[in-house]
Amino acid sequence: MKNKKTTNRETVLRIAASLFLERGYHLTSMDDIVAASKVSKTNIYYHFKGKEDLLAAIVDDLIAQYNQAMDDTVSRSDLPATQRLIMLVKGLVDQSVTGLGGSPFVTLYTQAAQEAVMIRAKIGDFFQSQMTLVEKLLQEGVNKRELDPQLPVKEAAAMIIATIEGGLFLQHTDQDNDVVSQVLQGLAYALK
């Protein structure tokens, strides 16, 4: 079996994502991306109109990766809804790339210019789809009597997503890898 060669576009996306998340979008120039990726500037501009277009492609790729992982977990109908919910939460945490704000989506959202409406909307839509997915699992858990029938599903879903993102941020600011595991334990306890 042949190994698939990484394209220049894929290399640029990977390197630029890393630089944007580690240094910051505004502190990373196209020249920095050229130097780190070893891909010529003309080749980069062949694939991307500019830095904002590159950021949009990075956000699209991150969303696709997260959505695939979430769909794989949610579709496991052989498992109870509560177990899939815990797996989903752990998967969201495990998928997180180290960024300036802990979560790659929070990092990129806060760094995108106010005028970058499309990028900010993509990230907002992603968080909304996460909450919808968590709501669906919570409602399934309530319907199957795995969770308290009085559970306010919509509010609980918002709390779970906010807690995950907050935990990722605290893990980053505190430089303490135990924070996220404490958050996960707290969520598991709260859902019993």
Image (cartoon, grey):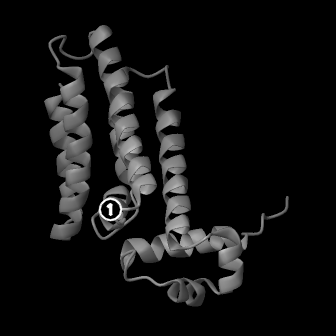
Q: Residue at x 35, y 66 (%)?
A: 113
Q: Is residue 32 left or right of residue 21?
A: right
Q: Residue at x 22, y 44 (%)?
A: 162
Q: Is residue 86 left or right of residue 38?
A: left
Q: Is residue 142 left or right of residue 151?
A: right
The answer to whether residue 22 is above or below residue 126 is: below
The answer to whether residue 123 is above or below residue 83 is: below
Q: Quadrant of the N terminus?
A: bottom right
Give the amino acid at mark 1.
Gln
Q: Which residue is mark 1?
A: 114
Query: Would you identify the image quadrant in which residue 23 lies?
Result: bottom left
Q: Nearer the viewer, residue 152 or 46?
A: 46
Q: How many marks?
A: 1
In percent of width and height, residue 53 lies at 55, 65
* Residue 180 seen in the figure: no
The answer to whether residue 157 is above or below residue 171 is: above
The answer to whether residue 12 is above or below residue 66 is: below
Q: Nearer the viewer, residue 67 or 143?
A: 67
Q: Element at badge 1?
A: loop
In percent of width and height, residue 10 lies at 65, 67
In percent of width and height, residue 190 lies at 14, 31
